[in-house]
Amino acid sequence: MKRKAIYLLLILTMFSCEYKLHDNFVEIEKPDNEIAIGIQLDAESNGETLYLSESNNIRFDLETSGHEIQRCIFKLGSREWRFDSPTGTFYISGYGHESGLDTMTCDVYVASGTGSIADQIGAESFYGTFSWPVVFLVEPASSLVHTVDDEGFLKLSWKKPALIEADFVCYKIYYGNDICAVIDDVDQLSYVCKSYFGEQGYFTVIAEMKDADKRWNLGQVFLSADIGITADYSQNDSIKVRWDNPYNAAVCVIINEDTLVSYTKDKSAYIPRLFGHADQNVRFVFFPYYEEDRLMDKSMTQFVFLSLSSGLLIALEFNYPRFGYNLAEDVLYVSSYREVTSLFLPDCKKIATYEGDISIEWSNAETYSAPLDHSKMAVRYHRIIELFEGKEMKSVKTILCQPYDGFTGPVSVTKDDKLICFVHDYAGNNIKGLVYNATTGVLEMRYDLPFGCYYSLDNSKMSSDLRYLTFSNGSSLLVITIENYQVTNTRELNLLYASHCFHPFKPEEMYVSSNGKVYLYDCKDLSVKNVWDYPGMNVGNIDPKTGYLLVYGSGYAKIIDTETKQLLFTMPVDDRNEISLFGNMLISKAGYALNLDKYLIK
């Protein structure tokens, strides 16, 4: 906008005026004529309207038809500029003034020139008022607001600024430092951003003018959607997760490196529950709704800790859980570090908890005895064995490993009240078997095993009649025969085995997994009684309650009837954690128990 003179003509009429000559005389004079005066303003205008920016110098010239100027008063809002001459200049600052329309006036007083007494004393004058529409072309206050439109996309809206449309170039919408839209229409006062999906960032709207000095910021908004993610565990085979993102987005759900849900545009998804899957953080990755807007670095990730296994959580995976089962009591035992808890089956309700004396033993529970016909239970730690009576876990005796160097391998409590266990004997350079009275804790007998003290029996198994003990030397499986608490024979299964277990009620039967097959051995002579093909599967154990054999691997668990040799049930599992079968319950070292009553009935 260029500076342009504005000329206005005004017909002034004379004021009626009352004045005193002295206390007893007042003269009233009536106006009886009119005069014409004009004013010319030199300012930025279109010839009618003044356009004011942040800094403005206004020059005026009054034409008074030969009459003497008395005063003129310019008014703009609360501001005034007074002059007693027909010409002058005044300054108007636009800083702090709201953008938009206003009005400026000029009150003009000129002498009447009638020669009357009132004229002579300055009490008679012609009066009139000029007025001009004024538009302040200053950077407006922020008017930018954000909403969600009916389709679920971000909508930015702003007010039209006061401007000269001929000077307008465009609106530019910035996301951060990047231009995401350019709008040429001065009357388009909103923009829908379909690439925004709730991530943290800020939008700015700029009005660009031909004059580079007039680049107006119409507002800036900082956005970050507070997305809540909830999980519904009411279904046993899947978890329904919902997210309340107000903006449209495509979402991927990722566990470890596996993408379970890929770019769903819904606001919920089902995640399959896999028995034995450890609880962990699940990644929810939000992307722009449309594929063409999905740049490599344009995403937002939220982590939610979810319980991914089916079944009941009975122990925390990271608390070193170990499990035992008492058939006589139909009670499951679970340890968390060194603390042991007994649970009713099948609902896994807590019965009792043993915490122990940390001054005697600070290590974790390692393994349990597996009684079939009595209620006494043993829990082995590294340096002690705790003996309990019944599901209430009434403490019977604490067995210390001294003078030996720590317990190893399985433990067992017999029907005739003997505790059988094994210790490292560094002085004797071997591993010894020890026989205690399970009530008094008195050591009654000891015997030597045929290998050095630095070996471990932690992967060894012992038959329920105590006649057979297994030991792995890394490349094969040794089967040790024990008669009257003395080693009588040691034989080797010369095969690369993966896992094995004894049948609890047929102690001479041993199941071994090797190279995709499950072998049934007779421990009396190590003859093979049967072979099944189960590629990628490991032997778990035989449930003392049902007699069913558990094998698992390659993402599945299979239940086999050891009497009929029939496959009874198959289910997908997370087999990265060890799985056991006790009391018709699948138990995972991830800390979960799953009741199989509705699948297996015996």
Image: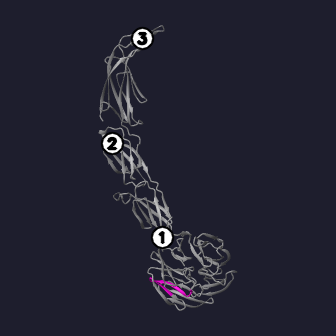
Q: Please report whichever mark, 2 or 1, sits nearer to the chain's N-terminal start.
A: 2
The x and y percentages for residue 538 are 48, 80
Considering only vertical position in the picture, is 20 above or below 6?
A: above
Amino acid found under the numbered disc labelled 3: Ile
Question: Was residue 514 drawn as part of the magenta stretch in this picture?
Answer: yes
| Residue 369: quarter of image | bottom right
Circle 1 crowding by C-alpha within 10 Å: few under 14, some 14–19, many from 20: many
Considering only vertical position in the picture, is 23 above or below 305?
A: above
Amino acid found under the numbered disc labelled 2: Asp
Q: Please report whichever mark, 1 or 3, sits nearer to the chain's N-terminal start.
A: 3
Name the residue: 38% across, 29% down: 104
Q: Secondary structure at mark 3?
A: strand
**Which residue is tagged 3?**
28
The x and y percentages for residue 422 are 61, 82
**Which residue is tagged 2?**
187
Say if mark 2 contacts mark 3, CB within 8 Å.
no
Amino acid found under the numbered disc labelled 1: Leu
* Residue 498, label in figure: none
How far apart marks 1 and 3 lie (CA) works out to: 107 Å
| Residue 336: quarter of image | bottom right
Q: Nearer the viewer, mark 2 or mark 3?
A: 2
Give the magenta range: 506-520
Q: How is the image coloured?
A: one colour
Image quarter where the N terminus lies is top left
Q: Nearer the viewer, mark 1 or mark 3?
A: 1
How far apart marks 2 and 1 lie (CA) works out to: 57 Å
Question: Was residue 152 drawn as part of the magenta stretch in this picture?
Answer: no
**Which residue is tagged 1?**
274
| Residue 298: quarter of image | bottom left
Q: From this viewpoint, is residue 339 visible? A: no
